[in-house]
Amino acid sequence: MRINELTFFRYIAASIVVIFHFGTDATGFGGVLAAGPQMVTFFFVLSGFVMGISYFNKEINNKSYWWARIARIMPVYILAIVLMVASSYLQGKEVNNLSLVLNLSLLQAWFSPHPLSINGPGWSLSVETFFYLTFPFLLYGIKSRNLSVKHMMIASLLVWGVTQIITTWVLSAGLYGGFPSFSHDLIYYFPLTHFCSFIIGVYGAMWVLEKKYSITNNTISLFIVGISTAILVILLNNETEISNFFELEFAFSSSFFAPLFLIFIIAVSICRSKLIRMFSARPLLLLGEASFSLYILQIPIHQIYEKYIVSDLGLSPLSNFTLFFVILTITSIGSFLLFEKPAMNFIKYFLPTFIRKTANRSN
């Protein structure tokens, strides 16, 4: 089961991350349009949801499962590291060997101060790898204990609640050291801090698979998706007001909005009207498929853009960012079609067959 309508929203979320990193001053955007860190929570919830949809009703074959995971993230991830390391050497900057080892092994998010080293956005892939490692065990635990959807909802919200209590306590009790610091890395990048988002996504998949709702009415679909979107936008635009109301500091970009992102994901998933299915149109689907390249390559492409393209154009800040964003999007589509997809197919299908045949010949 694949819900193509969700794919385009990956591009929207990745674009907001790019705006957060490079375009807030130029565009003047704030709130939801500059909520880059919060969009990473969306990726984590969506990851749990998609994994649950894909694997809940079938047995996981460990070999094919891991080849699929490696094929999905490693080619472009390694490409970004190579570009960043090359850029450092060309600029005469020293590359920290420990940071490089941690990045190559996808462990950087576990160790402060390395989460943002080499290629900053890569920290989320370190977290995703932890999700991939734990998912078969999580799925086994759910099935072996025959957890109902209701019990999974309670468990996922409990884990989320405990996580938010801990992060809120650290922020509100004067224990937070700001950026950069160990406490910052623990709250915002540490994999266990975000595990609740992934679990919530898995719960959402269980709910969708059990309920099997399919809303085909355009008006009702628009209402459901519109309401879930409006709630998200309103809350993302009013984080300061939320903190002031409760007189607490919340880690808004550390899984705080995970339940609301799940509501939005479920809303899109169950609405099968023609209006919502427009989001699965091939051009939008392609943008969504290229969103991983857009997300992970944004910093190396920005460095190339700043050094070789924009320096002599004399553009205004807004025109400068717009041109960069267009180039990044086009580059990401090219990366997906010409590198990411072929490399994914090579690792997922050809390489295991080649290794197996080679092993058989040697025996």
Image (tube, rainbow, N blue to C red):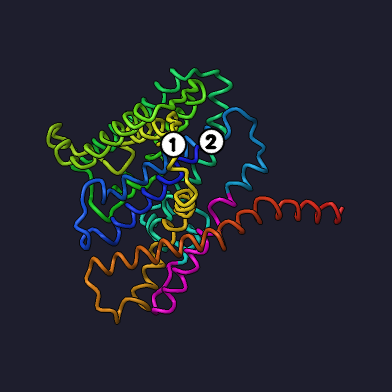
Which amino acid lies under the numbered mark 2 shown in the image of this protein? Phe
- Residue drawn at (27%, 56%) of the image: 180
Residue 135, label in figure? 2
Q: Position of residue 316 (x, y in %)?
A: 22, 71
Mark 2, Cα crowd under 10 Å, few <14 / some 14-19 / many 20+, is some
The residue stretch that appears in magenta? 70-96
294 inside magenta stretch: no
Dots 2 and 1: beta carbons under 8 Å? Answer: yes
Q: Is 336 positioned to the left or the right of 252 in the image?
A: right
Q: Secondary structure at mark 1?
A: helix
Q: Nearer the viewer, residue 206 or 310?
A: 310
Quadrant where the N terminus is found in the figure: top right
The residue where tag 1 is placed is: 198
Q: Can see residue 126?
A: no
Residue 209 visible from this viewpoint: yes
Which SS type dominates the magenta stretch?
helix
Helix, strand or loop at mark 2: helix
Q: Callout 1 environment at 10 Å: few (<14), some (14 to 19), or many (20+)?
A: many
Q: Please determine whether, in this image, residue 17 is positioned above or below residue 269.
A: below
Front residue (pair 173, 351) = 351
- Residue 337 point in image, percent of width and height: 55, 59
Which disc is residue 111 wearing?
Answer: none
